[in-house]
Amino acid sequence: MNQIKLVLGNIGGTILLLVRSLKYIPTLPRQFPRFIEQCYFIGYTTLPIVTILSFFIGSVLALQSGYSMENFGAKQFIGTLVGLSMARELGPMMVSILLAGRVGSAITAELASMKVYQEVDALETMSIPPERMLVLPRLAAVLVMMPVLAIIANLCGWYGGAIVCQYTHFISVDSEAYFAALKHFMKPQDIVDGLLKAEVFGFAIVLVCCYTGLNTRGGPREIGASVTKAVVTSLILILVLDYFVTKILL
Amino acid sequence: MSSNFASTAYTAAPFIGKTFGVTVNKLSKKFGRTTVLRDISLEVKAGEIFCIMGPSGSGKSVLLKHIVGLERPTSGDVKIGEFDASDPATRDKVHLALVFQAGALFNSLSVYDNLALYPREHRLCNESGIRDRVMNALTILSLEKAVKKFPSELSGGMKKRVAIARALVMEPQLLLYDEPTSELDPVMSATIIEIIATLREQTAVTTIVVTHDRALAFSIADRLAIIMDGRICAIGTPAEVKQSKDPAITNFLNPVIDLKNPRFKQLENNHE
Ligand SMILES: Nc1ncnc2c1ncn2[C@@H]1O[C@H](COP(=O)(O)OP(=O)(O)OP(=O)(O)O)[C@@H](O)[C@H]1O
Ligand SMILES: [Mg+2]
C-alpha cells in the first residue's frame, strides 16, 4: 500500500516538475549558453559509444538474419530487415539506454549533490527556480540531441550490416544490393517514427533523472542511491514506453 | 579594511528605504518524532540587528530556515513584513539573502560566477556593472586572489567569506547570517562584524545573525535571543541579557574552564 502511494507520489511529482519547468520556456533564449553546454555534454558523452555499439548491432543483425534467411533464399532482403529494425526499434532503443547510463546518471548525481550540499536551497533563497536553471536547459538539449544521435545510430548500424553482408562468405550480398533493398521497402515514415520514439524516451529519461536528483534527501550516501534509482527507473520506463509508443505509431 | 568598505558603492542599494521586519509566531517544528523548535515567538524590527545565540544543536539553523522559507512550520507561522515566509512567492517580493552555515557555494561555478549568478539571473545590471559589484565585494573580504578559483580549491574560512560576499552582492532587504565568523581568524572576524554593522548603517537592512561569538553578539546586536533546546530562554538588549540571573544563561555565556573537574568527567559521574 505504501509502495503504491510512493510510486503515485513520484509520478505526480515528476509531472509537476515538468509543468513547472515548461512555465519557464520564455526564459530559454537568454539561457542559450546553458542549453549549448548541455547539448555538448549529451552529445560528447554518448556519441563515441553510440557509434561503436550501433555499428556492431547492425553487423550482428546482418549476420544472424543472413544465417537464417539463407535457408529460404531471402538473402536479398537482409538490407530491408536491418534497415527497418535499426530505424524503427534498435536505434532509438539503444541510444536511449546509453543516454540513461551515461547522461541520466550524471544528471542525477549532479543534481543530487547540489541538493545534498544545499546548493538547491541557496538557489531557492535567491529566488532562482531550480526548474528554470537546472531542468529546462537539459530538457531542451535532449530534445535537440536525441534525433541527431538516433540518425547517427541508424547510419552506423546500416553500414555495419552492409559491411558484414559483403564480406561474409556465406552471405556475400554486395552493398549495392543491400542498400537497394533497404531503400526499396523503407518509407521515410519509418525513420520519422524511430526519431519520435527517441525523442519520447530521451525526454522521459532526463525528466525522471532530474526529478530523482532534486528529490534526494539526506547525506552523500543517498546520492549513489538516487543514481541507481534513476537509472533503473529510466530503463524500465524505456521498455514500457516503447510498447505504448510502438502501438500508437503502428 | 573597514575604510575600504565605507568608500564603496554599497549605498546604492536599489531597494533602499524598504526594509522588512520578521515576526515569528508560536513556531513549532518536528522532524518525525523529535521536536526541534517549541513554541518560539519573537519579533525582529525592520532595520534591526538581531542576534541568536544558543548551544550547538539547539535549533538555530532550523529557525533560520523557517525564516527564509526552506522549511515549513509544524505549527505557528513566520511573517516577513506582511508576507508569509513559507510561500515561495514571498521571495520575489522581499529580497533576502542567507549566508549558510556550510557556505552552500555552487561547486561547479568559479568564485566569480558564484557571486555573479544572482545579478545575472535577475538582470540587475549589465555585465560591467556586475563586474564592479562582484569585485567590490571580493575586495572587501580580501578575496581578490580567489576570483578564478573553484569552491573545492578554497579553505573553510575562504568559503565562508565567499558566501558572505555572495550575500553582499545580492544587496538584500533582509540578511541572515548563520555563524558568519565561526571559521575565521580574529582579525577577519572583526572585519566581518564591522561589515555587518556598516551595511546596516548604510542600507538599513534587517539583519539576523546566528552566532556563538560573544564579541559579535554583544558589540553589534540591538537585541538578542538565547535559544536552548528549541525554546527561547532569554530575549532583550545585550545589557538585559547579560544581567540575567538564570544560571543556565550565565553558565552558557561565561563558561568556566575547570581542568581539575572537567565537564565530561562530571557527566560520567552522573551516569554512574
Ligand atoms: N532535516 C532534519 N531532519 C531531522 N532532524 C534535523 C534536521 N535538521 C536539523 N535537525 C535536528 O534539529 C536540531 C537542531 O539543529 P540545528 O542545525 O538547528 O542546530 P544549531 O542550533 O544550528 O546547531 P549548531 O550551532 O551546531 O549549528 C538538531 O538536533 C538536529 O539533529
Ligand atoms: Mg547551525
Image (spheres, rainbow, N blue to C red):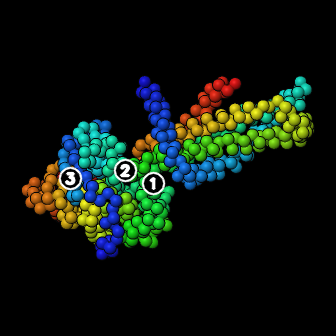
Q: Are dots 1 and 3 on a single chain?
A: yes
The kind of residue tagged 1 is Glu
Q: Do the numbered discs 1 and 2 sit on residues whose CB atoms are within 8 Å? A: no
Q: Is residue B249 above or below residue A240?
A: below
SS for tag 2? Answer: helix
**Sequence order check: which comes first, mark 1 or mark 3?**
3
Pair 1/2: label in front: 1
Mark 3 vs mark 2: tell me if same chain.
no
Q: Chain of mark 3?
A: B
Quarter of the picture containing the N terminus of chain A is top left
Q: Residue at x 38, y 62 (%)?
A: B169
Q: Which residue appears at 65% of the width and 25% of the height?
A: A248
Residue that label 2 marks? A125
- Residue hosting label 3: B44
| Label 1 close to label 3 by CB (< 8 Å) | no
Camera-side residue: B43 or A161? B43
